[in-house]
Image (cartoon, grey):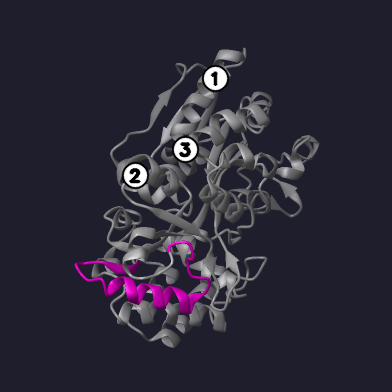
């Protein structure tokens, strides 16, 4: 999984799609726009609306999530890049460092709503004080829980856990219902899933996995070890189903949809999914709590920028700024269940559902690690982050797993 929540749900589906062009036929006079599969449901009507109202046309290409960075790398190497690129925000530091994105600092600062744009997106797209991309789509991680199982277990369905002890206690009571019901679930073989739903427990407890500048690993701090021990206790006492250990993201949300899981970390996308396709599940959402209180969330989504070598940079920035206007954010994002990337437009997204308010607040306060080596460190399911979680949670030797990961993080960040 990449780190934007919905990616996991769509991972399997994305593999069966080939890259496709739509909206208008390819033409040398058209600006070209590449998006990941997970953003296609938003980008397709968006481009259609733009083309219906603007002289300069845009040709959209949807790329399978897992192929996106490789396809863009090939394009950049050949000098045949798209004019506009919407990419997972965690990869923007890497692209900016490689000099593959256009500096749009002055134009970005001039936008009348610049101060409302997602702080997480803006931070990861800023390198050396210069801005290389703007927010395009948003996703926030949170804890979703089954109110029906809470009731059956004698728990208050309107009082979700506020700390780790609460999660463990509630998980045990829910698991005790029997019949294959488990109190908790997470995708244990998926680095991207874990950064999205496990790291917030560390952040909410005052810890982190990297220094603020992304140059130094901080895995050996107590908050990280404590979080790993927290998960290990739930695993070793049977609160998590056996399938978790080998789940590379395929069942990121699917286990919860069976109605037999009490709590799972997921993304805001799950709220719309559950309401639309599983009305039989009475559910609530809550931010990830810290060990002794506090909350945190991963702020994910895609950023949009102009690759170096774009043949239509003027049209590209005009389109990017149009995407961020209030009418577009409300009509094509908020009303379709996507969190708007502007802090002043939450009301249109929430629309009276308190669960969506939790999701909007979680995203607005969320954070994301800054690293130009994110894939090597985190997203690689055989990399040091995912390996650490596997060895600590399922193996139980937390100290050894952390020491090994800290060493490997240090080597990767040093370019070794």
The reply to whether callout 1 and callout 3 are in contact (CB within 8 Å) is no
Q: Residue 31's x, y, as percent? A: 57, 23
Classify mark 3: residues with Cα within 10 Å, few (<14), some (14-19) or many (20+): many
* Circle 1 SS class: helix
Residue drawn at the location 54% of the way across and 69% of the way down: 289
Q: Which residue is mark 3?
A: 39
Q: Residue 230's x, y, as percent? A: 44, 79
Q: Is residue 165 magenta?
A: yes
Q: Residue 113's x, y, as percent? A: 75, 37
Residue drawn at the location 42% of the way across and 82% of the way down: 401
Q: In the rendered structure, which disc, 3 or 2, sits on the residue that comes first in sequence? A: 3
For residue 170, the mark is none
Residue drawn at the location 49% of the way across and 66% of the way down: 159
Q: Is residue 28 visible?
A: yes
| Front residue of this view, candidates 401 and 150 | 150
Classify residue 144 as left or right of residue 135: left
Q: Give residue 349's quadrant in the image.
A: top right
Classify mark 1: residues with Cα within 10 Å, few (<14), some (14-19) or many (20+): some
Above or below, comparing residue 366 to residue 402 in the picture:
above
Classify residue 401 as left or right of residue 334: left
Q: Is residue 30 visible?
A: no
Q: Which residue is mark 1?
A: 49
Q: Is residue 134 magenta?
A: no
* Circle 2 SS class: loop
How far, Cα to Cα, is label 1 from label 3?
Answer: 16 Å
| Front residue of this view, candidates 279 and 362 | 279
What residue range appears in magenta?
157-184
How far, Cα to Cα, is label 1 from label 2?
Answer: 32 Å
Q: Residue 322's x, y, as percent? A: 66, 27
Q: Which residue is mark 2?
A: 279
* Circle 3 SS class: helix
């Amino acid at each position: 999984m990449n780190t934007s929540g919905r990616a996991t749900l769509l991972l399997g589906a994305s593999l069966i799609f080939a890259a496709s062009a739509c909206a208008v036929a390819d033409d040398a006079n058209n600006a070209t726009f590449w998006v990941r599969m997970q953003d296609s449901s938003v980008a397709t009507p968006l481009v259609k609306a733009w083309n219906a109202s603007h002289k300069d046309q845009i040709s959209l290409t949807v790329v399978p999530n897992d192929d996106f960075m490789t396809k863009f790398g090939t394009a950049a190497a050949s000098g045949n890049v798209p004019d506009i690129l919407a990419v997972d925000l965690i990869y923007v530091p890497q692209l900016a460092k490689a000099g593959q994105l256009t500096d749009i600092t002055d134009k970005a600062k001039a936008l009348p709503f610049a101060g409302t744009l997602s702080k997480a997106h803006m931070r990861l797209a800023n390198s050396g004080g210069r801005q290389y991309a703007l927010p395009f789509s948003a996703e926030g991680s949170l804890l979703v829980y089954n109110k029906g199982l809470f009731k059956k277990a004698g728990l208050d369905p309107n009082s979700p856990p506020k700390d780790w002890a609460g999660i463990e206690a509630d998980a045990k009571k829910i698991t005790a219902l029997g019949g294959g019901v488990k109190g908790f679930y997470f995708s244990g073989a998926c680095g991207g899933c874990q950064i999205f739903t496990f790291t917030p427990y560390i952040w909410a407890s005052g810890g982190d996995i990297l220094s603020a500048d992304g140059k130094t690993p901080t895995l050996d701090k107590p908050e990280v070890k404590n979080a790993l021990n927290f998960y290990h206790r739930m695993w070793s006492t049977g609160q998590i189903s056996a399938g978790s250990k080998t789940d590379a993201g395929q069942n990121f949300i699917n286990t919860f949809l069976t109605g037999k899981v009490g709590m799972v970390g997921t993304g805001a996308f799950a709220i719309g999914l559950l309401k639309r396709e599983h009305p039989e599940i009475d559910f609530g959402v809550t931010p990830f709590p810290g060990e002794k209180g506090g909350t945190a969330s991963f702020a994910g989504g895609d950023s949009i920028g102009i690759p170096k070598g774009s043949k239509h940079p003027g049209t590209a920035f005009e389109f990017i700024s149009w995407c961020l206007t209030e009418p577009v954010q409300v009509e094509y994002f908020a009303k379709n269940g996507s969190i708007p990337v502007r802090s002043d437009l939450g009301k249109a997204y929430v629309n009276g559902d308190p669960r969506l308010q939790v999701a909007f607040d979680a995203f607005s306060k969320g954070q994301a690690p800054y690293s130009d080596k994110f894939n090597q460190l985190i997203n690689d399911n055989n990399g040091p982050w995912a390996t650490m979680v596997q060895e600590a949670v399922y193996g139980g030797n937390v100290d050894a797993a952390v020491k090994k990961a800290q060493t490997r993080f240090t080597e990767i960040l040093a370019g070794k």
